């Protein structure tokens, strides 16, 4: 059964000329069967005559060029037309005349350049053939019948042109889908880089600034510099992990942060000088899809904003693991204007947000929305800001 299924795949590996040749051979064999002699297309009303050597040549000219009907469609149509002209002028009326509409269909479908010129050239070549057949047939057929046959030949050409335009539209659709997919992937990578780099670099900047004022306390200075070093190492580790995710052979299961990473994240923020109260309730499910990763990013972005815009203010992180969802709430005390910046308020002053782009919160809102959850970030009554997220568990990655 497996071998039978592989036959179409193996057949598609052959050159297109090899794949088109059987049609020409089948038509050639059928045209040479005596029972089919003089039972093909009859144009001009000429009496039929027995097959001879020239008849075989005419049949071969009509059938064998079909092997190149997709590779060289104009050449195929030219050879088939010559064979058809000999066939009709000599009165063989062979079954091979069926190759003419096939060649026209192929030209309409596969010719990419000079389509109009080709149509005009072959239309002009049809005129002397029709005149010669009309004279040899002594007017057995009226001019209107020649015109009708010409219109009948235009039908397969038009069908081929329709197939070509349909194929081009499908290729354009696939290109747009691929372009959209690449853009979405670039946006996802940009969000990951923003989350990883912004948090760690912000922590390092805050720690380094604090170290400038600890030169008189060597022990505390050493602790601050050690914290900067540890944060840098964690940034490198997270960046390597992100780059590993870009490897197509990398497993998707490693995308979720390891158990306990939230506590490590909170501890790192504390060492940067931010007082953080952390509460984690419930037991994380064994399989939550992307929910754990998104919850981690929500806490990471909220703590980064707290370090930037409310440094030193009390911050609370509450995470609850439920059977069907994970809820996250991060709140920070702070002044009104800086809280607006941290929460991404539309009324925030750009001058109050040095380097802030709003990309982090916007990316989080999109991530949570993709998983079917709810996300909000805003200024609290009385000052400060709060970030809330409800993330359905077991959502597909």
Image (cartoon, rainbow, N blue to C red):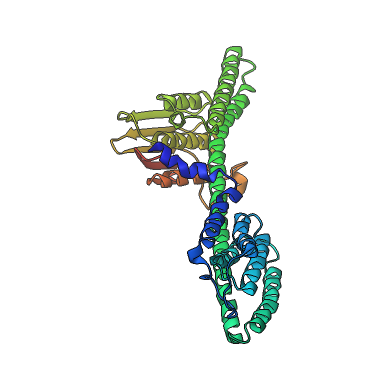
In the rendered image, the quadrant that contains the C terminus is top left
- Residues 303 and 293: in front is 293
Taking the image as shown, residue 347 lies to the left or right of residue 370, namely: right
> Is residue 1 shown above or below 130?
above
Asked which quadrant contains residue 233, the reply is top right
Residue at 45% x, 40% y is 6
Query: Image quadrant of residue 116?
Result: bottom right
Left or right side of 140 for 397: left
Identify which residue is drawn at 56% across, 26% down.
Answer: 240
User: Residue 153's spot in the image, x, y percent?
Assistant: 58, 73
Q: Nearer the viewer, residue 5 or 360?
A: 5
Occupied quadrant, residue 228: top right
**Image spot of residue 218 (x, y percent):** 61, 13
33 or 318: nearer the eye?
Answer: 33
Q: Considering the image in quadrants, where does the N terminus appear?
A: top left
Instruction: Say whether residue 216 is left or right of residue 177.
Output: right
In the rendering, at what x and y percent does residue 252 appear?
45, 32
Q: Answer whether residue 290 is visible to the viewer in this image.
A: no
Compare residues 359 and 120 and report the one nearer the observer. Answer: 120
| Name of the residue lying farthest toward the left | 323
């Amino acid at each position: 059964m497996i071998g039978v299924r592989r036959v179409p795949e193996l057949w598609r590996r052959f050159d297109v000329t090899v794949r088109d040749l059987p049609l020409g051979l089948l038509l050639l064999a059928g045209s040479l069967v005596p029972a089919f002699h003089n039972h093909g297309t009859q144009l001009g009303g000429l009496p039929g005559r027995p097959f001879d050597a020239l008849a075989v040549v005419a049949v071969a000219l009509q059938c064998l060029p079909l092997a190149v009907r997709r590779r060289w469609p104009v050449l195929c149509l030219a050879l088939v037309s010559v064979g058809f002209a000999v066939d009709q002028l000599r009165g063989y009326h062979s079954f091979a005349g069926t190759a003419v509409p096939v060649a026209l269909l192929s030209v309409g479908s596969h010719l990419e350049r000079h389509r109009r010129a080709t149509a005009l050239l072959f239309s002009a070549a049809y005129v002397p053939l029709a005149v010669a057949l009309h004279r040899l047939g002594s007017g057995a057929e009226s001019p209107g019948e020649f015109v009708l046959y010409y219109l009948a030949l235009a039908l397969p050409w038009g069908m081929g042109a329709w197939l070509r335009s349909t194929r081009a539209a499908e290729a354009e659709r696939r290109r747009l889908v691929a372009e959209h997919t690449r853009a979405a992937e670039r946006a996802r990578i940009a969000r990951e880089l923003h989350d990883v780099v912004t948090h760690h670099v912000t922590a390092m900047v805050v720690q380094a600034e604090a170290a400038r004022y600890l030169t008189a306390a060597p022990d505390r200075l050493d602790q601050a510099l050690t914290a900067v070093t540890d944060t840098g190492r964690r940034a490198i580790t997270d960046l390597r992990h992100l780059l590993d995710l870009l490897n197509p052979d990398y497993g998707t299961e490693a995308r979720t942060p390891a158990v306990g990473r939230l506590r490590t994240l909170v501890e790192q923020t504390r060492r940067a000088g931010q007082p953080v109260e952390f509460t984690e309730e419930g037991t994380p499910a064994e399989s939550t899809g992307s929910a754990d990763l998104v919850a981690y990013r929500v806490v990471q972005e909220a703590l980064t904003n707290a370090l930037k815009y409310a440094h030193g203010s009390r911050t609370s992180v509450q995470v609850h693991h439920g059977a069907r969802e994970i809820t996250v709430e991060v709140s920070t005390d702070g002044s009104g204007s800086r809280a607006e910046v941290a929460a991404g308020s539309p009324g925030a002053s750009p001058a109050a947000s040095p380097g802030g782009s709003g990309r982090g919160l916007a990316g989080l809102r999109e991530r949570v929305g993709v998983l079917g959850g709810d996300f909000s970030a805003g200024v609290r009554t009385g000052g400060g800001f709060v970030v809330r997220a409800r993330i359905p568990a077991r959502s597909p990655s």
